[in-house]
Structures are given as structure tokens and as C-alpha cells.
Amino acid sequence: MTDINREWLLAERPTGEPDLDCFELRETEVPVPDPSELLVRTRFLSVDPYMRGRMRDAESYAEPWAVGDPLKGGIVGEVVESDHDAYDPGDLVTGEGRWADYATLDGDDVAPVDPTVADPEAYLGVLGMPGRTAYFGLLEVGEPKPGDTVVVSGAAGAVGSVVGQIAKRAGCRVVGFAGSDEKTTWLTDDLGFDAAINYKTTDDYRAALDEAAPDGVDVYFDNVGGPITDAVFTDLNLDARVAVCGQIAHYNDEETPTGPRKLHGLIPVRARVQGLLVSDFATRFGEASERLGRWVASGDLEHRETVVKGLEHAPDAFLGLFAGDNIGKQVVRVSAADGE
């Protein structure tokens, strides 16, 4: 084991869209775990859109990072040192770590990773926070019923791709918005979506939606916001449900945009709009993990990870989220199984 630990810090707060000047790579010593902690060598690191909010000096559902703080996120790693009864050196675990080669994690706050169910990186996507967000957001907030039409924005991302597949399992017609022909083809040909719309090549979202969802929209799972959501709001059916999971179209806005007012359209259809935080379902994470794991192991739930190699490229992987570089879950491979 090397004595050097590289970790990324927040160098400055971004104005508008972040760039590489917001990040600083520092070399430190490998941390020493307390008796209750594990020393973990990071194998895979998660980068997620919500992290943009942690770069602001403002209250949010996720605690903001201070300038100079290490950046944090979900990791999959190999246990190097452990005095914990449940874990031995060599075990794979997942938990909240740092953008770093090594991290110390509380042994009671991690979960085991079973590579016989799926590749380890899947535990940051379909079998991790994004998968649980899709599971509870659709089933508990969206409440899909057989025959419903479910529309998903950001449908080729880590959350949206799982939402659409679970909706198909529930007997729904599923329409996804995504940002390239490669992504829309993946949604329809591999994941079983009934229709997919490339929002980057579509001039009239409402017309495209009318064609893809001729009977209107019963459930809208919103990962994006912006003009896509404006279009969907005009096509909601009676008693429609809207799950607001993310608003990535606005994460880099310095001022809150004011566009056409759409809320009046909710009145005649009595639609329900509800924000979603997966942490609200923490006591039921075991339920979601068990079902998602079973579906993945059986091949009933497809998943895909876009892997960027090298801790030094973690900021590039994060910034790529806002350019739509990823299909499925964006992760960074920090180290290989053999430690290289």
C-alpha cells in the first residue's frame, strides 16, 4: 500500500457552470482509521448532479461544501484495514467516502458489495442511491397503474433509465426524453421504452409528446425541469402525478428563471406535484435493495455505467454530467482489483 493519498478539494465556488478551476488535487498521507472505522481503498467513485448544489454557499437538502473541503460522494472500495466484526480485509463495501484514493468509513454505515449479483460499479447506480431513488420515486410518489402513460425526462441517466424499466414492469406505456440518438435507441431497443424523444433535435416538444403519448400523461418523473417540463405540464391527464426528482437544466443558473406560468394547468386536471428525496425512505432501503438486486440478477433490469478511468479525471467526469456525456450511471474507476 502506498503512503500517498490523493484527494480532491473544492478550490472555489463556481459562478454559473463549474469548470476545472473549481477543483484542486492534493496529496496527503493515507488516513488512519479509528477502532470503529474501516480503511477502504476506493475502487469506484460516484459523481452525481446533486453535487452541484453542494458547491453553493446556500442551504439545501445536502450540506454545502466549504471552500478547501474534501469532496465527498458514494464509493465502492476494498477494505484494507478492519477491526469491525462484519468486515475483513479484501471485502468490497459501499458507502459515503471522499474523492480520494483511500477513505475511512464507519463500519456500521457501509453495506457489502456482492460481485456475483452485478459488477461492483453497479452498486453506485442501479443497486445504489440512483436505483433506490427510481424505485421509491416512481412506486411511492408516481403511483403507476397498469395502462398509465409514464413520461421520464433525463431518461437515459442513472435514475431515469431505472424508472422507465420499473414502469414497464408495472404495465405502463413509457416515453423518455434523452439527448442523443444513441441514448434514445438504447431506451427503446434495450430497455423496452415504448417511445423516446431526442430533445436536442426536436423543435416542438409538445408536438413530439402528442405523437409519443397520444392519450396524455398520467405520471411524469422529472429529472430535468426547463422547457421539457413546461411541455409535459400542458399534457397531464386527470389526477396525474408528477414526481420532481431533479432540475439539472437549472443547476447552473445564477438567478431563478421565470418562464410561462404552468401551475394554472394543474387545476382542471387536479394533478399532484410532489418533490422527492430518497432519504425519506431510508427505513425501507432494504426492501428496495432486495427487489432491485433480484431483478438485476435475473436479467429483468438492465443497467449501464459510463466509466471514466483515473481519480485525476474525476472533475472531468462530474462536468460531463452537464454536457450529457454519460449513458446510465457516470462513475470514476479509481483503482483496479489488483491495486493498480
Image: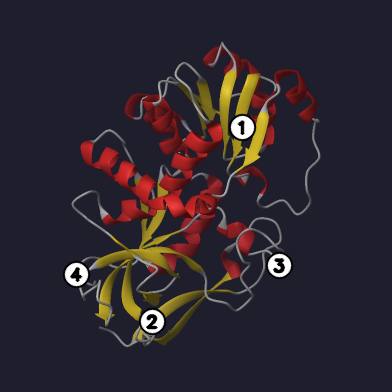
Q: CA distance from mark 3 to mark 2?
A: 27 Å
Q: Earlier in the sequence, mark 4 or mark 3?
A: 3
Q: Which mark is on residue 338?
A: 4
Question: In the rendered structure, which disc, 1 or 3, sits on the residue that comes first in sequence?
Answer: 3
**Which numbered mark, 4 or 1, is in the foreground of this view?**
1
| Pointer 3 residue | 57
In the displayed structure, 140 sits above or below 77; it is above
The numbered disc on residue 5 is 2
- Helix, strand or loop at mark 1: strand
Q: Nearer the viewer, mark 1 or mark 2?
A: 1
Where is residue 307? Give x, y as percent.
35, 53
Among numbered discs 4 and 1, the one appearing first in the sequence: 1
- 222 left or right of 155 in image: right
Q: Looking at the image, which is closer to me, 302 or 266?
A: 266
Q: Which mark is residue 242?
A: 1
Is there any visible trace of residue 141 in the rendered image? yes
- Is residue 200 in sight in this rendering? no
As shown in the figure, which amino acid type bears the numbered disc 4? Answer: Asp
> Would residue 297 appear left or right of 249 to someone viewing this image?
left
- Give, as a three-letter code, the residue at label 2: Asn
Give the CA distance from mark 1 to mark 3: 29 Å
Q: Earlier in the sequence, mark 1 or mark 2?
A: 2
Q: Nearer the viewer, mark 4 or mark 3?
A: 3
Q: In the rendered structure, which disc, 3 or 2, sits on the residue that comes first in sequence?
A: 2
Real-space Cα separation, disc 4 to disc 3, in angstroms: 39 Å
Mark 1 residue type: Val
Tell me if mark 2 has few (under 14), some (14-19) or many (20+) residues whose alpha carbon lies within 10 angstroms of its own. Answer: some
Relative image position of residue 125 (x, y in whole percent):
39, 50
* Rendered view: 281 above or below 10: above
- Identified at 43% across, 86% down, the residue is 28
Disc 4/disc 1 C-alpha distance (Å): 45 Å
